[in-house]
Image (cartoon, grey):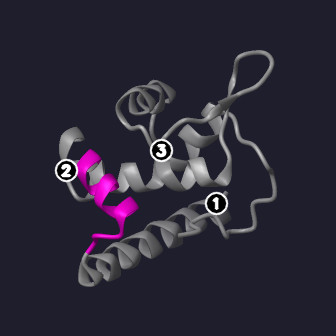
Amino acid sequence: MAMLDTGMTKLYYTISEVANMIEEEAHVLRYWESEFDALRPRKNRAGKRVYTKDDIDTVYRIRHLLRDEKFTIDGAKQMMKKARRGGKESSSSVEELKEIKSFFEKLLDRVNAN
């Protein structure tokens, strides 16, 4: 699921850029890294995290599960594992895509307002 088809052209993003994109604090992203095996951004030579579009897709998925779907960390971990195995129900996927679309529309409105 490519969530970042919004005209962004950078290959790598800093943790602060990603935190701003998803409206969370950087320390939250670092915590999620410790909890979710699927989230492992690379580090550059200076030891700073660099996020790819795939990493950001994973962050959006985690955020959606925790904030929008109200899963616990353990519940979100289980959903991430199910998604990797392809065990998600199609109706929940459609609802999730609708919510993601709505989130991006709001984000674009916010960006365009600035």
Image position of 12 (left or right of 93): right
Instruction: Give the number of the disc on residue 8.
Output: none
Question: At numbered mark 3, what does the secondary structure look like: helix, strand or loop?
Answer: loop
Report which residue position mark 2 lands on: 71
Q: Main secondary structure of the magenta part?
A: helix
> Residue 50: x and y, percent?
69, 34
Image position of 7 (left or right of 60): right
CB under 8 Å between callouts 2 and 3?
no
Rounded to the nearest angstrom, the CA distance separating label 2 from label 3 is 18 Å
Q: Which one is earlier in the sequence, the residue at label 1 or at label 3?
A: 3
**In this rendering, is residue 30 above or below 62?**
above
Rounded to the nearest angstrom, the CA distance separating label 1 from label 2 is 28 Å
Question: At numbered mark 2, what does the secondary structure look like: helix, strand or loop?
Answer: loop
Report which residue position mark 1 lands on: 111
Which residue is at 53% across, 70% downward? 1
* Disc 3 packing (10 Å; few <14; some 14–19; many ≥20): few
